[in-house]
Image: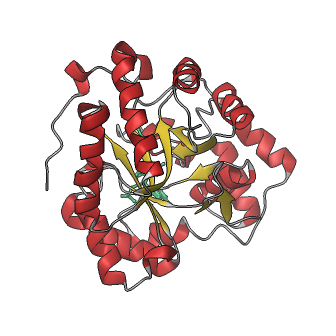
Amino acid sequence: MTTHLTLNNGVVMPALGFGVFQTPPAETAEAVASAFDVGYRLIDTAAAYGNERGVGDALGASGLPRDEVFLETKVWISDYGYDQTLHAWEKSVRKLQGEVIDLFILHQALPGDFDRTIAAYRALETLLDEGKVRAIGVSNFMVPHLERLLTETTIVPAVNQIEVHPYFTQKALQRFGTEHGILTQAWSPIGGITSYRGDDSRSTFNDPTILAIAEAHGKTAAQVMLRWHLQNGVQAIPKSVKPARIAENFDVFDFALNAEEIGRIDALDTGVRGGPEPEAITLETFGREIPED
Ligand code: NDP
C-alpha cells in the first residue's frame, strides 16, 4: 500500500493528510501539532478557513524541516482575477509564514463568471512558473468546469479536491480526472458532512455495512473509510480536533480491505451531495473578504 502519490508534474504528496476546515483559529496550531506528532505530513487549509496562521505556527514550532511537510491551501472566490489571485498568494504565504506553497488550488469554480475563474487559474500558472508554488489545482470543479479549464489554460490541474465519502462518490467525475491525469482528493473523506447537521441517523459513522467491515478487521468506521479511499487511489484529508481521533485516522496502514468489501462500500453511494451545489456558487452568495494578515 503506497503512502505517497505522485502528481502529474512529478511532485510527490502524502496519500493521507490532515484537514482543518471548521477548526477554530485558536485551536488550529494545537490540532496540527497533534497531527505532526502521529506522522501526518500534509496539511490542507484554505484562505477562507481563517486558520492558515495556526498551520504556519504549528509548522514553525514543530522543528520539522520544511521539505518534509506538504502545505496545501486554497484561494477564495473573492480573490479571483489574475492580479487578485497573485495577491492572494502573498496573503496566504504571509500567514503560513513560509516562502513556497506546495499545492495552491482554486476553492470553487465561479460558473457565472468563469472568465474570472480562468484568470485566477492563469495566476496559479504564473506562480508555478516562478517557483512560488510546487503544484496547482482546483476544488469542487465538475466535468464541464474541468473541460473548459483544460481548453482555455495550459497546465493540467494536479488535483481536483471534491466531496467523496461512501454516501457520495462522484465516480464519473473521478474517472474524468483519472483520464486527464488529475488526482482526486476527497474532502469530508469520512463523511463528516453527513453528520455536521446533528442528524446521526444519516451519518456514515453509524452505517451498518461500514461498521460490520470495521468489526471484521478490528478497526473503526473512520479507519475503514480512509482505507477505502487509499485503496481506490484517492487522496484523503480527514479533520479532527481530538488527539485520539487524529491518531486513529492515521492508523490505517496495517490492514487491507478485500475487493468484496471495497465493492460493498462503493455500493453505499446515494448520489446525494452534502455540500453546496457547485453550479450555484456566486460572489453575491458566498463572497467575503479575505484579510491581509
Ligand atoms: P471529515 O470527513 O474529515 O469529518 C470530520 C468530522 O468528523 C468532524 O466533525 C470530526 O469531529 C469528526 N471526526 C473526525 N474523526 C473522527 C473519528 N475517527 N470518529 C468519529 N468522528 C470523527 O469532514 P470535513 O468536512 O472536515 O473534511 C475534511 C477536510 O476536507 C476539511 O478539514 C478540509 O480540509 C477539507 N474540505 C474541503 C472542502 C472544499 O470545499 N474544498 C469542503 C469541506 C472540507 P472532531 O473534530 O470533533 O473530531
Image vertical order of residue 115 relative to residue 204, above or below: above
Q: Residue 72, how many percent across, how many down?
A: 43, 55
Give the camera-side residue of 255 and 37.
37
Give the camera-side residue of 162 and 283.
283
Q: Residue 12, how many percent across, how many down?
A: 62, 62
Residue found farthest to the front: 130
Residue found farthest to the bottom: 63
Image vertical order of residue 89 relative to residue 178, above or below: below
Question: Is 92 situated left or right of 201 in this image?
Answer: left
Question: Is 109 situated left or right of 85 in this image?
Answer: right
Q: Residue 229, how many percent across, how many down?
A: 66, 50
Q: Residue 293, how many percent across, how many down?
A: 13, 56
Q: In the image, what residue occupies the spot 57% across and 56% down?
A: 222
Which quarter of the figure is the N terminus placed in? bottom right
Q: In the image, what residue occupies the spot 29% across and 64% down?
A: 96
Give the camera-side residue of 122 and 254.
122
